[in-house]
Amino acid sequence: MTAVILALGGNLGDREANIRSAVESLKGHKAISKVKLSPLVESYAVTLDGIDESKPKFLNAVISLETSLSAKELLAFAQQIETAQGRVRLMRWDSRTLDIDIITFGSTLKATKNLTLPHPRAYERAFVLVPWMLLDPEAVLPGHGSVAKLAADLRDQVVVIE
C-alpha cells in the first residue's frame, strides 16, 4: 500500500457536498483505505495571473489515504470522480465544481506529460498546505520540508471553515 495525499477543491455548485461526495467515492474504492479528511478551508481563486478575488471562492481540503493503485490508476479514478461531479475541462485555471490533485504518492518523484509527483506547486499553495498541516502537523513535502513551516507564512490566505 502506498500513502497518498490528495488536494480537493471547487468553487462552483455545492462546494462542500462535492468534496464530501468525492471523499465517499474514494472510500468506496476497494483498492483505497484509511481515508482521512482535513478541515475545510476557503480561499480566493488562483488563476494564471495570480489570485482573482472577482471569481467565486474555493472550498478546499486535503485527504490522506493508502492505496494499492498505481499513480496513473489513481489519477484516472480521481478524474472519473471529477467528471461525475460535473467538472468540465474547457480552460486551465478556470472555475470548477471539483478538482482533485495528487500531491504526494509515497516517495515517488516523477514527471510525465500528465502527472508530476510531488505536485509542482503544492509548496506555495496555502489551500493545500494549511489543511494538510491541520490534518498532519508532522507532514513533510518531499523536496520542500515541513508542511507546517511552509504553511506558516501562508495561513492568512485561507479561512478555516471547520
Image (spheres, rainbow, N blue to C red):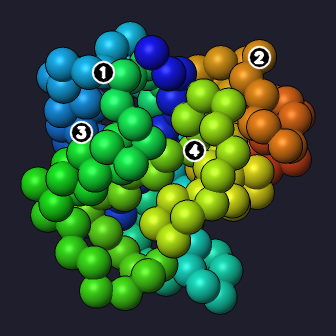
Point out the tag, 2 or 1, that comes first from the N-terminus: 1
Residue on which the image places disc 1: 32
What is the secondary structure assignment of the residue under circle 2? loop
Residue on which the image places disc 4: 103
Q: CA distance from mark 2 to mark 3?
A: 25 Å
Report x, y in % for residue 10: 36, 58
Q: CA distance from mark 4 to mark 2?
A: 16 Å
Report x, y in % for residue 97: 26, 62
Q: Tell me the tag on residue 22.
A: 3
Query: Which amino acid does the dot numbered 4 rest on?
Result: Ile
Give the quadrant of residue 84.
Answer: bottom left
Left or right of 108 on screen, residue 55: left
Point out the tag, 1 or 4, that comes first from the N-terminus: 1
Point out the tag, 2 or 3, that comes first from the N-terminus: 3
Q: CA distance from mark 2 to mark 1?
A: 22 Å
Report x, y in % for residue 71: 44, 42
The residue located at (26%, 21%) in the rendering is 31
Viewer-closest of 76 and 25: 76
Residue neighbourhood size for the residue with mark 1, other residues' Cα within 10 Å, grouped as few (<14), some (14–19), many (≥20)? many
Asked if marks 2 and 3 touch (Cβ < 8 Å), the reply is no
Left or right of 38 on screen, residue 98: left
Point out the tag, 3 or 1, that comes first from the N-terminus: 3
What is the secondary structure assignment of the residue under circle 4? strand
Query: Which amino acid does the dot numbered 3 rest on?
Result: Ala
In the image, is residue 74 above or below residue 33?
Answer: below
Point out the tag, 4 or 2, that comes first from the N-terminus: 4
Point out the tag, 3 or 4, that comes first from the N-terminus: 3
Q: CA distance from mark 3 to mark 4?
A: 16 Å
